[in-house]
Amino acid sequence: MNITLKIWRQKNGNDKGSFQTYQLADVSPDMSFLEMMDVLNEKLIRNSEDPVAFDHDCREGICGMCSMYINGRPHGPLRGVTTCQLHMRSFKDGDTITVEPWRADAFPVIKDLAVDRSSFDRIMSAGGFVSVNTGNAQEANNILIPKEDADMAFSAAACIGCGACVAACKNASAMLFVSAKVSQLALLPQGRVEAKERVMKMVAQMDEEGFGNCTNTYACEAECPKLISVENIARMNREYLKAQLT
Amino acid sequence: MNTLDSKIPPGPLEQKWTKYRSTIPLVNPANKRSLEIIVVGSGLAGASAAASLAEMGYKVKVFCFQDSARRAHSIAAQGGINAAKNYQNDGDSVYRLFYDTIKGGDYRAREANVYRLAEVSANIIDQCVAQGVPFAREYGGYLSNRSFGGTQVQRTFYAAGQTGQQLLLGAYSALMRQTGMGTVKMYARHEMLDVVVIDGKCRGIIARDLISGKLERHFGHAVLLCSGGYGNVFYLSTNAMGSNVTAAWKAHKRGAFFGNPCFTQIHPTCIPVSGDHQSKLTLMSESLRNDGRIWVPKQKDDKRNPNDIPEDERDYYLERRYPAFGNLVPRDVASRAAKERCDAGYGVGTSKMAVYLDFSFNMKRYGTLEANKRGMHHPSEEEIKRLGREVITEKYGNLFDMYKQITGEDPYEVPMRIYPAVHYTMGGLWVDYNLMTTIPGLYALGEANFSDHGANRLGASALMQGLADGYFVIPYTIGAYLSNEIRTKAIPTDSEAFVEAEKKVSETINRFFEIKGTQPVDHFHRKLGKIMWDKCGMARNEKGLKEAIQEIRALREEFWKDVRVPGSANEFNPELEKAGRVADFLELGELMCMDALQRNESCGGHFREEFQTEEGEAMRDDDKYAYVASWEYKGNEWQLHKEELQFENIKIAQRSYK
């Protein structure tokens, strides 16, 4: 396959940045998108050009590190698939593919396609946990949890923290990310004890980081590679309201 | 240092840990506040250790090269975590988990360490549940279990095919809680590039801020390396792209011995290589072997669609060779058996280097069970298929999706094609019972150490070991060292040893840029991987290993003459990071081959073709090789030290899964 790539190049956070166009021949349909980027980078290095910086690690869709905005969609065209699991067979010979970084004030660009998502860590530090020290725990099967609740908690906990929800949202809202953690812990008896405090603190930190508001477009759910449901946002809103009223 | 003191406590096996744990010196809370601990790596071992130590009151700094602690490669572990809870009433116990692990490791692990691991396994599940880890549950609300290889009980706890993710997010949440309280300072996007040793004790590290490129000096009363394994020496492995040996290797070069470097785990069920562009391999969890049956056609070079091959023309070779354990033999055994069939010409797929992993039989069984549960009396084939598919989706949905995404084939309809791939390294930094390396004050936890899995790790035991080390071992054993350090004031980082270490790191970085060669880093990494896979992989022999050593030396020389590293040191430069890691792999590879060469026996994942039984099973030599090979770095060569293994509680025997 022959592919034309329009890639966002930006030296660092202070640079203005612009698109550069690259041609790539002999792309195999079996290559993953990132393997195609590897081929491009090898070519650039051999030509004494600066390779494209991008984040990636596990390349099996679970670490949440990869983060490309491909043809106007976070993680590209397939639903429920991260960039690293996207393969070139999803494109056609002769295609032009546009690749950009996540764009959000709370995710400043580091270089090219790599952005700083440490704001997510700070939100987790604000309350995304159960306050239990090592050694405190009781016997595991003393806490019975209905299978349905456990399954729902698991679905929310499957979030990989990649930030696609923020990148997809016209307001750059982090509601889906935050609500996934709030929901997981609100659904479990272990998390109920601190539920009020947790939702207040996490939402306050989310606002402080400069993420936008939710206007219910559901672009986040549509683009989430782990198919996290917007029901979590509704649950978080209920939790937040409850916490404010009591 | 010529003798290795494993510091195994005296007394009967069952009492060693409980008794020792109650007698380790303590550090009082006020003193803990002035003791600083550096943790390198934020996976299961690192995150659990850092959170636990901070909860106790120590001042902790955590370093990881990823952009967040949550991305460490423990996140990708799929199948589950073992614990001797005996919830299934199927005869499990601490002793049986201990026994299975020693036997699974082909009698090359320390009894005392493994027994301790089995003892604390149950506490890990309690701790994780308390954190809100959403393990799979039964309809009654109780925790669910499944089987893994090398055992005949169901002791594996799981969260679909994402158990590592859920456990790591649990440990990460504990870590983030401490970060929020200010007891842990996080250094994400930082890579450790050397340890600092002063008067024989480890006193800190040199790290590079990967965004600015700036080198930093950090003091610590103790340093914990929780930096994972070195499977990426093979280039293609199931490891993450960034997984590397650098932290452990730098420590090795400063005096920490390296234990059993040649013990590598080749996992039997991975998606086969599809082409030269391949950058990594993807695992299909061992848990799939619960419900999948492995087979090849009985006829060589059979080109039929697998669904068209009738039952009696299929060779379920694991069930045939190992009736007692069947598809659930340990990984080393299953991998070798797959290689044997493919080498003999029975492989499938375009490359002929693959075997089938088939779910149709169990999908039908589950469908029938489910139909019975729902009171459907005469379900059609279609209904059974649909119900069976639902059960399989709930157990392994993410894995089936992943397979389909990578291969373009639907494993609900056709059997998966799988082949062995490098997955885990049992070898690592040598540690004593306290998890301390041969450098006082420097510890190694999780996959980074060599200690618990012998020559082959059982499935679902890596998560167990990482969390055991971090939550329940190091918080106690570190007291043995730090109780003597309460008078040590923080050493200023402008002292000579720090300056010297940073200068050395800086010189290496500059050297990369001065070469201005013609080949990118990956070129050398791929070549190294090929040498390692061909000559130090699933099967090894004397001739191949000797050749490999020469080839690696030549490749290393070529690397230092012809590598091209673009950009500069003072910027975000992923190619520079790769260059440093590959430079270390190029040294480690040689040591792995040397280790494989000196071990004139076959055991676990180490299969020397010269040493096998008539049936092609690994043939150990317990008289000569029942030891840990522990290597000391001596400039341009290595010296071998042997830690003899004592088996006082288990009768050492030929491993049999028949």
Image (cartoon, helix red, strand yellow):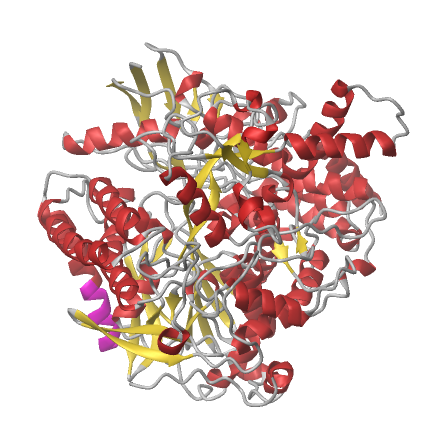
> In which quadrant will I find the N terminus of chain B?
bottom left
From which residue to which does the magenta span run? B495-504
For residue B502: magenta? yes
Q: Nearer the viewer, residue B200 or B262?
A: B262
Is residue A226 in view from this perspective?
A: yes
Q: Is residue A42 left or right of residue B435?
A: left
Q: Is residue B618 left or right of residue B595?
A: right
Q: Position of residue A218 (x, y in %)?
A: 64, 23
Say above or below: A11 vs A127: above
The picture quadrant where one finds residue B61 is bottom left
Q: Position of residue A65 (x, y in %)?
A: 45, 40
By secondary structure, the bulk of the magenta-drawn segment is best described as helix
Say above or below: B468 vs B321: below
Q: Is residue B195 left or right of residue A208?
A: left
Say above or below: B335 vs B106: above
Say above or below: B85 vs B132: below
How many numbered discs? 0
